Image (cartoon, rainbow, N blue to C red):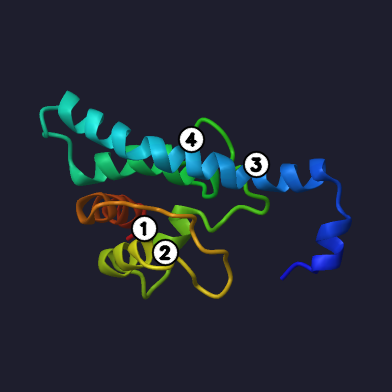
Amino acid sequence: MSNPMTEAARSPADRGQRALPLVAALAAIAAGGALWSAARAAHGGAVSSIERGRELALSICASCHVVAKDQPSAPALDPPAPAFAEIASRPATTATSVQTFIQTTHRDGRSAPLPGLQLSDEQALDVANYIMSLRRS
């Protein structure tokens, strides 16, 4: 938790710099639904849930998480949120638990809440299926 006195003493530029990952995440969230719909339409609905989940995650989640080894840029969040491969490797993780986590408060006691993520049930399941596809057998 940040100290309000310390936060108030920071320059506006410092406070703005800290807000950049949040702004990037919010912009990605706003664009994510449109990208998901466009990808689905472009493939005539034939894209698998895992493929849709990967594309959606790259457009929305990569600001904070390592979504894929080949993602175009590193997460802006420092330190980054858990990598999707790490989440998938947790023994108790299931597609249902990931979908629920995405659609609820996105709090695990170690991380900040996800800012205003509004995914449909199908989109959340697609992202969950993508994450679970990263689990090593």
Disc 3 residue type? Leu
Look at 51% across and 63% down and name the residue there: 113
Q: Disc 2 to disc 1, how far (Cα)?
A: 7 Å
Disc 2 residue type? Ser
Q: Disc 3 to disc 2, how far (Cα)?
A: 30 Å
Q: Which residue is mark 2?
A: 89
Q: Disc 4 to disc 1, how far (Cα)?
A: 19 Å
Q: Disc 4 to disc 3, how far (Cα)?
A: 19 Å
Q: Which residue is mark 3?
A: 20
Q: Which residue is mark 1?
A: 136
| Element carrying mark 4 | loop
Q: Earlier in the sequence, mark 4 or mark 1?
A: 4
Query: Residue 93, which numbered label?
Result: none
**Pick the front one: 133 or 115:** 115
Q: Locate the C terminus and report the quarter of the image it occupies.
A: bottom left
- Against 61, is 72 above or below? above
Q: Earlier in the sequence, mark 3 or mark 2?
A: 3
